[in-house]
Amino acid sequence: AMLFRNDETRTRSVVVINGASGSPAVRTYEKDVRDIGLMTEHDEVLVQLRNEIETISYQCNVMQTTPLADSYDGFLRIGQNLFLKGYDHIPCLEYQTPDR
């Protein structure tokens, strides 16, 4: 997964290239995308927006939205935990995989 910024249209695009499919999948956001991360064991991409984390499939379909209590600069995933990078604190969020 890659994140691209288009300053002319003020959008961000998440592009997912999966070896199993013939063409990349693209999801475009008009919101500020802070960070992205792969969940390869579930074929998912985590997209951190200002106050939420979206879980999207490799086809860029939204599977789940997890609200965040505050705004964070990014995250670090360790196992099933997401450590949210805040200005003066790093809370831990236990990630729950979406129901399939």
Image: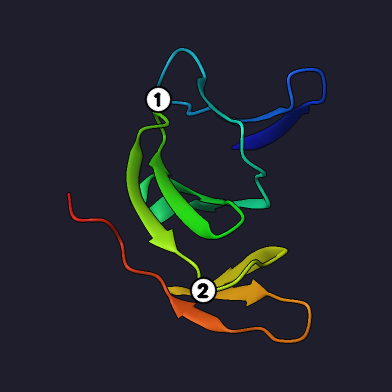
Residue 69 image label: 2
- The residue at the point 70 percent across, 86 percent down is 89
Determine the residue located farthest toward the right in the rendered image. 7
Percent position of residue 85, x then y:
70, 73
Determine the residue located farthest toward the left in the rendered image. 100
Left of 33 or right of it: where is 98?
left
Work out which quarter of the rendered image holds the N terminus and state it: top right
When asked about the image quadrant of residue 88, the answer is bottom right
- The residue at the point 64 percent across, 66 percent down is 71
Determine the residue located farthest toward the top in the rendered image. 22
| Viewer-nearest residue: 24 or 51 | 51
Percent position of residue 57, x then y:
37, 39
Q: Report crowding for label 1: few under 14, some 14 to 19, many 20 or more residues within 10 A (C-alpha).
A: few
Task: Give SS at disc 1.
Answer: loop
When asked about the image quadrant of residue 97, the answer is bottom left
- The residue at the point 45 percent across, 13 percent down is 22
- The residue at the point 48 percent across, 29 percent down is 18
> Dot 1 corresponds to which residue?
20
**Structural distance between the alpha carbons of marks 1 and 2:** 36 Å
The amino acid beneath tag 2 is: Ala
The amino acid beneath tag 1 is: Ala
Residue 39 image label: none
Q: Count every numbered label the image shows and give the total.
A: 2
Check the image and report above or below for 86 versus 89. Answer: above
Which badge, 1 or 2, comes first in the chain's sequence?
1
Percent position of residue 36, x then y:
61, 49
